[in-house]
Amino acid sequence: MKKQHAPREATDAIPHKNIYLMSLRKLFFIAALVAVIFACKRNPLKVDISEIETEMEVVRFEKELFSIPLQDTLAELTALRNKYPEFFDLFTYKVINAGGIMQDHFPDIMGKFLTDSMIVDVKQKVEEEFGSFQKTERELIKAFKYYRYHFPDKELPVIYTMVSGFNQSVVTAENIIGVSLDKYLGRDYSYYHQLSNVPLYKINNMHPGKLVPDVAYAWGITEFDDSRHITTLLDNIIFQGKLMYFVDALLPEMHDSLKIGYTAAQLEWSKNNEPQMWNHLVENRMLYSNKRMDIVRFINDAPSTTGFPVESPGRAGVWIGWQIVREYMKKYKELTLPELMKNTNYQQILNDSGYFPE
């Protein structure tokens, strides 16, 4: 007689299947969690620019200017002006104050500029630092591909590099950006510390890494001048926030500290003290002040923000405005960058942002 085996319970028959299903569910859960985290962290401004073929032009103006033979200066300068008429006049009139090429004293002033011992030394340092401009040029081209993505109908500017004798870092005109390479030679450059009108907090941002964000910010001011609509501190704060968001859009991969020109410690301080800074403005009823000194105190560059601890960076109002606009754009994901830059209702931006740092 055959030995009969007791029937196996159903649960005994499928232990491995249960384990498999549990493992599969766990994998799906982890994958979903990773996707959510990634989606939360994904930068919406990191758009696809691979199809944008149009590239801006970069002209090494200082190379051509300093290669002029000094024995026939006026003729050579005339030829250079004919080649780049708009930028040449911007440079001679507005940057180095040499006047125009038709003025009698012009060849003499330009000759002195081109042979000045300090200028020659600076030009040599520029050659050492920016002799190979490829990396910076690629960064500029990429930034303006992002610009073209957001503003497909706008004309791209031409960027001219120059040696200005430590004058303006970036100058702009219609479809023109001029960049003084001698303002980005590094914090330790000896000449900077000999300039009586340049404080240390400014020198800290005179390095090659600051060139591209300065260009983006300057172009934002040029293209989106809201001065007719700006009267109060709140207006200034939100306008500056829009400009910083514009920089975000052109440089979505760049660290915030470079965009705004803060040290790591200053950036951390701003994040940690954002609620206290905002409460200070609200409780002291400063948002609607139109006093010049109130606006300068929170918007202009400085070693720190007056009224805040010495550890605070300058331009605290710019930082706050930046966070307000970021919150606004997070809340209204359908808004485009052109729509943001066109919006001059600063009170509405604040109200709709739901900004309330904690």
Image (cartoon, rainbow, N blue to C red):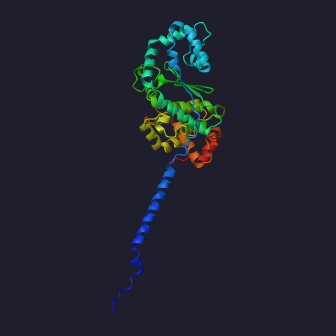
Q: Nearer the viewer, residue 65 or 319?
A: 65
Q: What residue do we see at 36% from left, 86% from top? A: 6
Q: Quadrant of the N terminus?
A: bottom left
Q: Residue furthest bottom?
A: 1
Q: Position of residue 217 (x, y in %)?
A: 55, 32
Q: Nearer the viewer, residue 303 or 134?
A: 134
Q: Is residue 285 above or below residue 204?
A: below
Q: Position of residue 53 (x, y in %)?
A: 58, 36
Q: What residue do we see at 46% from left, 15% from top? A: 119
Q: Nearer the viewer, residue 265 or 245?
A: 245
- Quarter assignment of residue 171: top right
Q: Position of residue 44 (x, y in %)?
A: 55, 46
Q: Is residue 123 above or below residue 104?
A: below
Q: Is residue 31 above or below residue 78?
A: below
Q: Is residue 262 visible?
A: yes
Q: Is residue 199 visible?
A: no
How many marks on residues? 0
Q: What residue do we see at 42% from left, 80% from top? A: 10
Q: Is residue 106 above or below residue 58?
A: above
Q: What residue do we see at 50% from left, 15% from top? A: 66
Q: Position of residue 337 (x, y in %)?
A: 61, 41
